[in-house]
Image: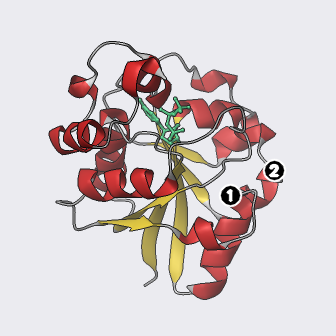
Amino acid sequence: MKKRVGIFGGSFDPVHVGHIEAAHSFLESGLIDQLIVLLTPEPPHKTDREKTDYTHRLKMLEIAFKNNQNVIISDIEQSLPKPSYTLQTVEHLHKNNSDTLYFLCLGGDSISSFHTWHRYAEILDLCTLLAVERPGFDKESADKDVLEKTIFVEHKPLDVSSTYIRESKSNQSDRLTDSVAEYINQNNLYQNGE
Ligand code: ATP
């Protein structure tokens, strides 16, 4: 039987409780055995601002998921050509792991905009989408062909985003794990809503 692996990509700038709870829900669905959390250096649809240093974002992911043995943090997109198109990454993984069935794991916002992704129909040919609901995004706004390939897993939606954490002037530690909040403080990241 093929191994079933989820791919959960993002800029994780920074990783927050919304990501962590989403990862738990993907794994608890029982549809996948393992989750690859994939750090994207330059998401094609988010070129509007300079990202926090890749090494810091990677370190925060490692800290956030260190107690979850079924989660693998991956930096493979660092070594693939830019921009980091999801199709390219999924094709790369497929080619190198033919004994694995991949599921692309996403929040509801990404399902709504999925039809705008680079050659999205080819991604749908390669994998089923697993999704968690995200407040503010109505799954009915997604394209029909995208919804047909999407399984929404059981999940308690959490209203949190990296943008809010980056831009907020107040303490956001309740939206982060303690260890990530500590890393952010020690490294003076996201100070003064910058
Ligand atoms: P930003 O605010 O910088 O756009 P973000 O909080 O949306 O960031 P990303 O790193 O862009 O986080 O997201 C990675 C993945 O996690 C995407 O599939 C996104 O839909 C999903 N995601 C992020 N936050 C949530 C949340 N609160 N609930 C469900 N899914 C989420």
Element marked by disc 2: loop
Left or right of 92 on screen, residue 40:
left
Residue 57, how many percent across, how many down? 43, 50
Q: Residue at label 1? A: 86
Residue 143's image quarter? top right
Nearer-N-terminus badge (2/1) = 1
Q: Amino acid at mark 2?
A: His
Q: Are marks 2 and 1 in contact (CB under 8 Å)?
A: yes
Color scheme of the displayed model: secondary structure
Left or right of 182 on screen, residue 165:
right
Q: Residue at x 33, y 50 (%)?
A: 60
Structural distance between the alpha carbons of marks 2 and 1: 8 Å
Residue 190, how many percent across, how many down? 40, 30
Residue 168's image quarter? top left
Please rate how many residues cluster around mark 1, counting C-alpha atoms within 10 Å: few if below 14, some from 14 to 19, many from 20.
many
Element marked by disc 1: helix
Q: Residue at label 2? A: 118
Classify the position of the N terminus by image quarter. Answer: bottom left
